[in-house]
Structure formats: C-alpha cells, structure tokens
Image: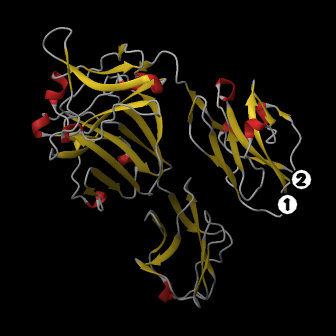
Amino acid sequence: MMENIPNENFDEKNTQERSGSHNQDVYIEGPKTVQEGKTAHLIGKVKFHPSIKNIKWQKECNGTFSGINIHKQKYKGSRNDYWNPILEIHDFDIEDQMRYRLKVVHEKFSTYSNEHKLKILRSSGTAKIEIPLNETVKRYRPGENITIKVRIDNPFNVRCAMWQRATRNKGKFESIDITLEKYKGTITKSTTNEAVLCLNDCDETDMSLGPYSLLATCSDKREIRSDSINLDIVKGFKASFSSLPKAKQKHYVCSGDGSSIYETEIEYNESVEIVGTIRSYPKDVKISWMKGSRPLNLVDSKYAGSYRLDDKFVLCIKNVTEEDKDEYRIRATEDLEGKQISDTLKIIVIGDKPKVNLRVSIESQPLKCGNTIVLEARIVSNLTRFDVDWKKDGQKIHNKEKFIKDHSEKLNPTLTILKASFDDQGMYSVITELEERSSF
C-alpha cells in the first residue's frame, strides 16, 4: 500500500480543476447525489507512471482542499492505492455535501483529478418542484420531439407524481396517460431530482391542450404543483450555420427568433464550406441559399460540390474573390411564404489578387544575339500561398538548358535566357497560381 499524504491545505487558485484543465491521466467517477444516511462511493482511475510516489483523497472546505484521513470510521473501506483508489463516505449528511478530488504526488510535481461534487438528498423536509428558466423560454417547431425537465428537491419525500394539463374549465387539470406513444420517455418520479415530460412529434394542438404541470403527493399527504409550462410551437423553420474555416460569432440579434451573425475570414482564392442545419415544418419544405437578397444558382461552377444530406445543406464556394464578400442565409419557400429565419454568415475576404509587373533586369546584357538576357518580375501580393511560373507565347517553358528559372525570392522571380538567338523572340509572361500575369 502506498504512503499516505499528510493533511494539507491548498489555495483554490492553484487548482487546475477550476479552469477545467485537470490532468486526463487521473479522474474520479461516482454519483452526483447521495440519499441522507446512505454511503457514497467514489472510484478513482490513475494512469501508472514510474514517478508516482503516492496519492491522496481530498475534500474541499471553504474554498480550499485538504487531505482525508481514510482510517476514520467515517471513511471505512476507502483506499489510497493508485491501482484501485476508492473513497467511501458512510452515513452521508449535510457536512459531507462538498467537492472531492484525488491528488497524485510525483517526484517533482503533483497532478489532480477532476472535482466531483456530491449533493445530499434529504429523506425529510418539504419537497419542492422547480422549473429551470431555460425550459420556459424555448420555442419549438411542429414535428419536433419535446423534452421538458423539472427539478424536484427532496424527491425521497415524494410518494407519487403525475404530469397534468389544464382543461377548458378554469383551474381544472387532467392527468396525462403517459403509456401512450405520444408521451414515450416521460418520467414522473426519479431519485435523481428530475422529472421529465416527453411530447413526441409535437404539433400546434399540443400547445392548445396546455399548459402543463407536475403534481406531486408528499409523504405527509400534502400535494404540491409546479408552475405551469406553456408550449410555444411555431410553424416555420430555423437554420443554424457552421463553416470551414470556422466562423466566429460576432453579435447576437435580439429579433425574437434567436438568430445570430457570424463572420469567417477567407484568404483570397481559398475555398469555404458553409453547413446549414435545418429544423423545419413541413419536413419537405423547399430551401434555397441566399447571397445578400439574391438566390444562388448552385449549378454555377463557382458552387460545385454543394449538396444536401438529410437536414444539412452544404454550400461550397470555390476560389473566393471580392465578389464573394457578402452575407449568406437560407430561405424557405412555398408553404412558408418565403419566410427566412436563420443565422447570418458573413464572409470576409482577406487579401487581393497579385499585381505583377515584368521587365528586363538592369543586370541583363543588351538584347542582342549571343548575350544573356535576364527578365525580372515584380509581384505585389499579401497572399501567403501562390506559385510562380514562366511562359513563352502562351506555353510553359521547360528547356532547362536554355532557360534558368530563379524563384528563390518569391516576389522577385527571374528568368535567364542563355545565348539569346532569333529563335528566342516571342511574348514572355510570368504567371502566378491565380492566373494574374504581365507580359513582355
């Protein structure tokens, strides 16, 4: 058995876990909640390393971590072995409700596991039902599967619970038959502080049948009811965007539809792929890509490779130029009357086409037969990736015995013509990968 670490206090600021960057070679697993009076079990996993000296279970108190004396009766059965670290906390009470972690001491440094918080479930006291704020502001589309979750404090004090919906008689409720396929997945009571209502393949009638609530009967025979949940089911569609290269969210549009504006920077002549994920009703609604206020013709070779796969619409834009700088959206037509509810992806083009000038170098000999002629190009470009080559009368030059290409200075390439003759007369040009050229 490995040597125990003496009790120590550690400044919260020095723990890796606060930033979510704990060492992946050591972690702990276990339940998030423990019933009052029961035993909590945490299991550690430590990847072996020859520099490991010992390990120690720790707990947090007032923002700092200290070592746990596993020899106390409270922690009977716990182990500090690196091959099988176990922490058992018996007779769990409110004082045990805190964060726990493993410390692994190496020869020259220490590493820490993730922090695991345990919460007590009290078997006594008043039960309470809470609806998370995010469950009250969601908007759904017909055809979606709706899942609503509510929190139950002290679920062990709840004898039974049922989901209900309001009737047309004011103040009256009726229970939902959760055995129907419509409500498959619904949970009325759980020891994990959570009850779940599922409405599969929702439609606008589900909104008119509400609002919905959870009714619970406690051990003392009292009844408690959650606040009402009103469904917001809207006929329409929602498109969210992603892109390669990855776009960055710039601003959130407070327009009521939850849309956002994204920007992605593309280097001149590079390609971009925009992926639009659609949630729509009806399912077969027709979709078109928009550039500004104009629909795109995906038959154009500019957008070759664009496709649709299930609910994903992929727009490929080849070799972007300043003309592609715009805002891109998705529009639904026909049944939705051209309604457009989507994020906006704005393409920003970085750089411009190269500017190329060609001249006879000052190091060149006069343009006479038998002399060595040096042509020099001047390229102005802020692009990082492009190639340079030379042509004579529109054809690439390959004769290495007659011509010497020097591209060591990418923005100042040269072409040397050895022992010039009348056969070397013609139109010479330097070209970049972007087909921008200058002739001499």
**Secondary structure beneath label 2:** loop
Question: Could you say which disc has been placed on residue 51 in the image?
Answer: 1
Residue 279 in percent (x, y) is at 26, 41
Q: Label 1 to label 2, Cα distance in Å?
A: 8 Å
Observer-nearest of 291 and 103: 103
- Please give the name of the residue rendered at 44% of the width and 62% of the height, measured from the top-left corner: 436
The answer to which quarter of the image holds residue 227 is top left
Please state which of the two labelled residues, at mark 1 or mark 2, is closer to the viewer: 1
**Secondary structure beneath label 1:** loop
Residue type at mark 1: give it: Ser
Residue 323 in percent (x, y) is at 35, 47
Q: Is residue 15 visible?
A: no
Q: Residues within 10 Å of mark 2 (few under 14, many from 20)?
A: few
- Please give the name of the residue rendered at 71% of the width and 41% of the height, measured from the top-left corner: 101
Residue with the most extreme bottom position? 401
Which quadrant of the rendered structure holds the N terminus? bottom right
Residue 168 in percent (x, y) is at 13, 14
Residue with the most extreme left position? 334
Observer-nearest of 286 and 124: 124
Q: Earlier in the sequence, mark 1 or mark 2?
A: 1
The answer to which quarter of the image holds residue 21 is top right
Name the side, left or right, on which 217 lies relative to 77: left
Residue type at mark 2: give it: Lys
Question: Could you say which disc has been placed on residue 4 in the image?
Answer: none
Observer-nearest of 316 and 366: 316
Residue 283 sits above or below residue 229 on the image: below
Name the side, left or right, on which 270 lies relative to 146: right
Residue 262 in percent (x, y) is at 43, 38
Q: Are marks 1 and 2 in contact (CB under 8 Å)?
A: yes
Residue with the most extreme top position? 170
Question: Which residue is denoted by mark 2 in the rendering?
Answer: 108
Observer-nearest of 355 and 260: 260
